[in-house]
Amino acid sequence: MQTKIKIKNFGFYYNAHQVLKNISMEIVKNTITAVTGPSGQGKSTLLFTLNRLWETMEGARVTGRIEILFGEKFQNIYDPGFRVSTLRRRVGMVFQMPNPLPMSIYKNVVFPLKLKGADKQADTPFRVETALKRCFLWEEVKDRLNEDARTLSGGQQQRLCIARALILNPEVLLLDEPTSSLDDISCKMIEELLVEVKKECTILLVSHYLDQVKRIADTGMRLSQGQMIQEW
Amino acid sequence: MKSSLWDKGFHLFAWGCSLVLVAAVSIILGFLIVKGYHTLAPSLIFGDTPFWEALLLRRQVFDGLFPAMVGTLCLIVLAIVFAIPLGLFTGIFLAEYASPKVKWLFSLVFDILAGIPSIVVGLFGFSITLFLHHCFFDRLYPCLLISALSLAFLVLPYMIRTTQMALENLPMDVRMTAPSLGATKFQNIFYVLLPASLSIIVSGIILSIGRCAEDTAVIMLTGAVATAGIPRSVFASFEALPFYIYYISSQYADHSELMKGYGACLVLIFICMILFVLAHWIKQRLAQKLLYRS
């Protein structure tokens, strides 16, 4: 069991308010770690600290250290020499509400490649197909790839967003309550695909649903009053 | 019961306010159409000059609106071309890059600028021209370029504020999408934030086109004259429809001349409508290009 992420004495402040208090934990490679807890306790914030997305918020600051195993060695993700865009390509994220961009299904999945300047390569269509297949979406959309992504159902949109996050083959995937706006069938599909995805990816999942967490998570954590408690 | 009555009263009042506005616009348009429709003929625009000769600029039009239409169109296009990049990038800077203090200071300055009466902007443009004429370019006089720059200055606050507001009001999930996929700040602005706020930005541009088309105070001090013909260059004086309308309504010699003024109003409204439609069309094309084909 190899450690993928090391969080050491990590604190997060929003102006004067301390949201995360001195959190230390390790996340094992190719597992699903679920974080539960009451609303407003900083579960989403915890995810934002792993891809530095909090840096877009005014008045936020962090203390402590987070290291992620990239290749053979651990990288301090807050190292000034480590580019944030590189980090976010290796640590993908899926939000609570499906957020497809107002463009075609195909363009949505290709978008991260475009940002990287790698969307014109010969294997791009193959990579799109692979990403959509990993999310059990290929069969449903293969004949309508040029249609606006916003015409898909909520569950399909969320799977599209996961496919979009997976096209760069991230090593870590952060999911912020990805099924909270979906029906039972869509939830089940996403749970199944996450179990598949963890074979190649380390997953950190924030969820409200304890039964869901127990079904798919290898490790369960509870965030309460800014502190992390391991439940199993 | 009481609250339901209050609700209905409020609903009725809001409905009434909207109705008053629609009625006012309809009355103004109706009045202009009734007064001016019978003047709408090729002779209103081209006078006695055959229209193809006028369009090919072979013969000058003396007693028609053609030079004023060309002048107005040149003026609007030039002013908008100056104002768009400046307004857009300042708006982007304020929304995405400025620190809170800089944002506060700049916003205050632009709000003050928005409140400056157009006659003062015209006077400022005129003073600048005089200064340049005396100190640097003795062949520079009030002209199309000075008018267009002054008008651009006048509409800049609208452009800046609409761009800034459009970007700042984007929901957090739209704002976070591209960065979470590895986008740099520039990529996020260029690929996601600007296309997502395009329709509001274009509405700011449309508002600016309207302002450029109607403003008389600025141009009467900076280059518009009653009879100049078609402007030969940006350094020439020019005719413009709003100035023509002002001039004819204040100094008309007979009834038919006043009626021509009404005709000119209709032509001005028509030009604005064409420009609005064009702006919408460009918006659609641009959105499609930015989002689907890029």
Image (spheres, coloured by chain):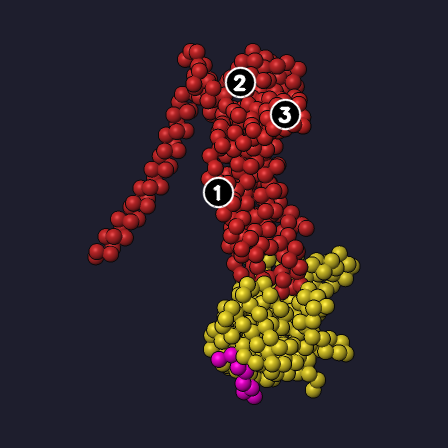
Chain colours: A yellow, B red
Frontmost of labels 2 and 3 is 3
Residue B71: percent from left, percent from top: 58, 24
Q: Do the residues labelled 1 and 2 touch (CB within 8 Å)?
A: no
Marks 1 and 2 share the same chain: yes
Q: Which of the marked residues, 1 or 3, is nearer the chain's N terminus?
A: 1
Q: Which residue occupies 60% across, 22% down?
A: B237
Q: Is residue A170 above or below residue B156?
A: below
Q: How far apart are marks 2 and 3 (CA)?
A: 25 Å
| Residue designated by label 1 | B112
Q: Are marks 1 and 3 on the same chain?
A: yes
Element assignment for label 2 = loop
Q: Residue at x 35, y 34 (%)?
A: B23
Q: Mark 2 points at which residue?
A: B226
Tell me the chain of label 1. Answer: B
Measured Cα–Cα span from mark 1 to mark 3: 29 Å
Tell me where the magenta segment starts and ends, as one range: A225-232
Q: Which mark is residue B134?
A: 3
Q: Is residue B189 visible?
A: yes
Chain on which label 3 sits: B
Q: Is mark 1 on a helix, strand or loop?
A: helix
Q: Distance between the residues labelled 1 and 2?
A: 32 Å
